[in-house]
Image: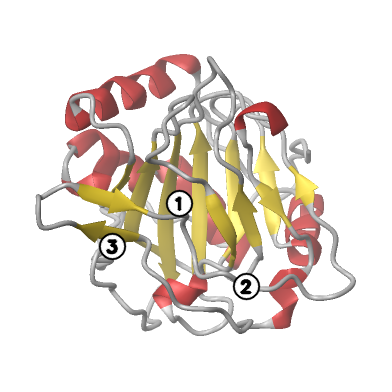
Amino acid sequence: MEKRDLSNGDRNFYKENGYLHIPKFFDEDYCKKLMDEAERVAAGDYRFYLTMHKESELFLETLRHPAILRVLDQLQSARMIPIGSVYFFCKPGNKREQGSVWHQDNYAAKAPEGSYFVCAIALDDADIDNGSLIVFPGTHKLGNLPSQPKKNIERLESGEIKVYPVGNPTEVPEGYEQKQLTYKRGDLILIHGLLLHGAFPNLSKDRWRRKLYMHYIKDGDPFWPGWNARRSLIDRGDFNDATPLGSDLTKESAIV
């Protein structure tokens, strides 16, 4: 894929809303490779997978893909370091995946405000029918909101993994309205670590909602690795090809 650069409009939209949607970031062939590799790893056990990048070289390469790192560095005006990933299958009619409650991602990473960042690749078209992402624009400016700690995943005595709705339940502050996003396979969705968001279960009878979430931290900032997610610093592998921050920011890209 060709290099992408953010426009000033992109950066301003993200600053005001706490998310950014970039259409057609990855092509069909690359998305198909990710889906095939996820099928290999899961072997029919469809749920959400923490640390998918530790199970597959392709997912590790994606986590530190130069085109993604270039965009994140520009958006955050900082060198962003990959630290983790989660893969959601969201098979239609699969009761093992229950969507996610309203939450901020930083409840888990416990990073300094504005440091933790999430980037998602949509691997299926998604809308209200199969439970696309819902965001509350502007809530990233409120800092860390109070939430109720709860389990997201549990290993039973039988060895079976039980999953719960993702996230620590967080009350929606007064005056903020939800926005249900619509996106296509290959789109990139960039999410501030403090943006309140969530998703309903996939209630569609025949449509999947596969998505790869990738986690990043500003270089040098601390974070909590987590008991299950096991976030850890990952070598970007680009020391000979660093992206100058703020370079080539004149191209316009679509905002949805």
Residue type indicated by callout 1:
Leu
Can residue 172 be seen at all in this image of the molecule? yes
User: Residue at left 55%, top 40%?
Assistant: 201
The quarter of the picture where residue 89 lies is top left
For image coordinates 30% across by 54% down, the residue present is 240
Residue at point 46%, 57% (across, down): 166
Which kind of residue does numbered mark 3 sit on?
A: Ala
On the image, numbered disc 2 is attached to which residue? 170
Name the residue beneath numbered marker 1: 69
Image coordinates of residue 138 in percent, x first then y, are 79, 67
Kind of element beneath mark 3 = loop
Residue 190 locus on image (x, y percent):
59, 51
Q: Residue 149 location, x and y as percent?
A: 45, 77
Q: Is residue 114 above or below residue 231?
A: below
Horizontal and vertical percent position of residue 197 = 64, 58
Image height check: is 192 above or below 50? Answer: below
- The label on residue 77 is none
The reply to whether dot 3 and dot 1 touch (C-beta < 8 Å) is no
Q: Nearer the viewer, residue 199 or 116?
A: 199
Q: Is residue 231 left or right of residue 199?
A: left
Question: What residue would you read off at disc 3?
Answer: 229
